[in-house]
Image: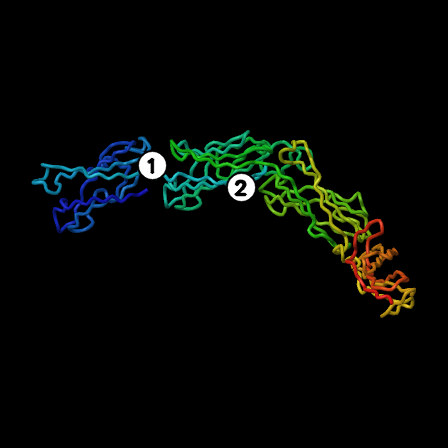
């Protein structure tokens, strides 16, 4: 970097009508790299070539020098990050002296080369075995030329090493994101290992690279985008950067397999519509530079054999795969078409062969998801009951009831589904003390979209206040409610 060096020396203003200059040898450089008069090394690249007065009779002299990489020449000793530099000017005419040269005073200035160090960041904390790894190193001290795009990592002065447990790349080059940013980026691709991940035989990656590089043989130190590293299912990736001779920075992330997810795009589909199957499995993003695909099994209650459905990655490196199923009620299942019927449960099954610890590499699990053909109705809205009432045998509503009078407890049922529903209609009558005096039921079937008004008979034998509660269940043996209950009060005189 450039340094503006200023010497304030009024005694050098020998001519008040001219701008004067003095040689750089007046300043001594003293650091671990070398001790020398600054005019002795062209590596300082001074502009101007000497200490020049800033104007007529100012007594202020300046020069811009470049802090060199090495002293005293290109083959000399390198300056370190944070190296201390002592600059010294000897004043042979200090204030109070009787004459020039009889006394002197050392005027000193201590500076340091910058030592901001570096930070290393990876774009993920956890990678899968075939992910692309994006690396960012922020290193302001390596922004050597503010007018150029700099590079780091590929020399012995600033080596970058990227490694997994079984593989490594030395001297990997990263490139500055722009002029004068001090931020350097690059990427490597994890290549996995020989394993049947998608149910096909062998390691099928559909990669644009050679099979040898896919299993971990790196094509050689290069960068910033052509590195490959073999990775295991339980592994890690480490990036080390030697910032200086005494300082190395490290960034790392872990590599793990994941348990997949399977789901349908919707909870239900019409019988002649289309459904979307979605599989989320980062481990099947076998080539992060292209779109991957594999097959899953889909079936219905009407066709238990089902179909083999191809699902395709939604984009490069997403790890999300989708496929469309067309439903039919008349045709046979074939290709992406699946035979279904109203009320069918449809199922997708994905066999996950890349499982995290504590599973073994040879373990598999089935990941399933289901949906319904037809409308999905809330459990208590399948056969809503309403308007519980007391009627006579002619279905006429009664306002009063007498002892020994036969009455009917009736209510209205309405189908909330697009399929037939079996039901049990129960009537419970309790007296004012909560004692049950009647529990009776009938069973029936409520057709899709229809309504009905079932009833149960009761003949009271004693006067008093009674409460009739109506329940609608799936059946007597399966007391799952199809509707909230309804009540009516009966006064018997």
Sooner in the amino-acid sequence: mark 1 or mark 2: 1
Residue 37 vs residue 102, the one in the foreground:
102
Q: Quadrant of the C terminus?
A: bottom right
- Residue 221 placed where, x, y %? 48, 33
Q: Secondary structure at mark 1?
A: loop
Residue name at image x 41 percent, y 40 percent = 139
Residue 312 vs residue 271, the one in the foreground:
271
Q: Quadrant of the N terminus?
A: top left
Q: Which residue in the rendered view is the most extreme toward the top? A: 166
- Residue 56 placed where, x, y %? 16, 51
Q: Secondary structure at mark 2?
A: loop
Residue name at image x 15 percent, y 38 percent = 105
Q: CA distance from mark 1 to mark 2?
A: 32 Å
> Compared to 219, does 404 lie above or below?
below
- Residue 176 placed where, x, y %? 43, 43
> Compared to 159, does 469 lie above or below?
below
- Residue 303 placed where, x, y %? 81, 46
Q: Are marks 1 and 2 in contact (CB under 8 Å)?
A: no
Residue name at image x 18 percent, y 44 percent = 21
Q: Which residue is mark 2?
A: 124
Q: Which residue in the rendered view is the most extreme toward the left? A: 98
Number of numbered discs visible in the structure rendering: 2
In the displayed structure, does residue 321 sit left or right of residue 488? left
Q: In the image, which disc is placed on residue 82?
A: 1
């Amino acid at each position: 970097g450039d340094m503006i060096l200023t010497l304030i020396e009024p005694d050098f203003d020998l001519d008040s009508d001219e701008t004067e200059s003095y040689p750089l040898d007046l300043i001594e450089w003293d650091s671990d790299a070398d001790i020398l008069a600054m005019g002795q090394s062209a590596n300082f690249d001074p502009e101007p070539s000497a200490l020049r007065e800033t104007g007529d009779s100012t007594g202020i002299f300046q020069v811009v020098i470049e802090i060199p990489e090495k002293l005293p020449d290109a083959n000399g000793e390198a300056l370190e990050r944070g190296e201390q530099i002592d600059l010294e000017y000897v004043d042979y005419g200090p204030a109070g002296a009787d004459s020039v040269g009889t006394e002197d005073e050392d005027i000193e200035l201590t500076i340091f080369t910058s030592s901001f160090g570096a930070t290393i960041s990876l774009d993920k904390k956890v990678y899968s075995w075939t992910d692309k790894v994006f690396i960012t190193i922020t290193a302001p001290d390596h922004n050597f030329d503010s007018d150029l795009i700099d590079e780091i990592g590929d020399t012995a002065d600033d080596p970058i090493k990227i490694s997994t447990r079984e593989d490594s790349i030395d001297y990997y080059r990263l490139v500055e994101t722009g002029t004068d940013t001090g931020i350097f980026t690059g990427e490597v691709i994890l290549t996995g290992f020989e394993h049947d991940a998608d149910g096909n035989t062998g390691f099928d990656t559909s990669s644009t690279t050679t099979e040898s590089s896919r299993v971990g043989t790196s094509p050689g130190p290069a960068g910033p985008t052509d590195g490959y590293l073999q990775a295991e299912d339980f592994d890690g990736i480490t990036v080390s950067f030697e910032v200086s001779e005494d300082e190395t920075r490290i960034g790392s992330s872990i590599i793990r397999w994941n348990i997949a997810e399977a789901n349908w795009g919707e909870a239900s589909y019409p019988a002649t519509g289309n459904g979307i199957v979605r599989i989320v499995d980062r481990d099947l993003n076998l080539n992060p530079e292209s779109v991957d695909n594999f097959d899953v099994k889909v079936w219905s209650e009407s066709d238990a054999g089902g179909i083999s459905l191809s699902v395709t990655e939604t984009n490069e490196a997403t790890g999300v795969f989708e496929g469309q199923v067309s439903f039919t009620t008349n045709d046979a299942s074939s290709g992406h078409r699946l035979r279904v019927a109203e009320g069918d449960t449809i199922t997708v099954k994905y066999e996950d062969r890349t499982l995290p610890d504590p599973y073994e590499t040879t373990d598999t699990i089935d990941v399933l998801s289901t949906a319904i053909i037809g409308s999905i109705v809330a459990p208590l809205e399948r056969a809503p009951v309403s308007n519980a009432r007391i009627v006579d045998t002619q279905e006429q509503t009664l306002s009063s009831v007498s002892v020994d009078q036969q009455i009917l407890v009736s209510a209205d049922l309405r189908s909330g589904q697009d399929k037939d529903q079996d039901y049990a209609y129960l009537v419970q009558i309790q007296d004012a003390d909560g004692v049950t005096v009647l529990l009776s039921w009938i069973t029936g079937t409520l057709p899709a979209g229809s309504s009905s008004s079932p009833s149960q008979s009761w003949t009271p034998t004693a006067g008093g206040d009674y409460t009739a509660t109506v329940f609608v269940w799936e059946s007597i043996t399966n007391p799952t409610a199809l509707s909230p209950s309804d009540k009516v009060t009966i006064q018997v005189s």
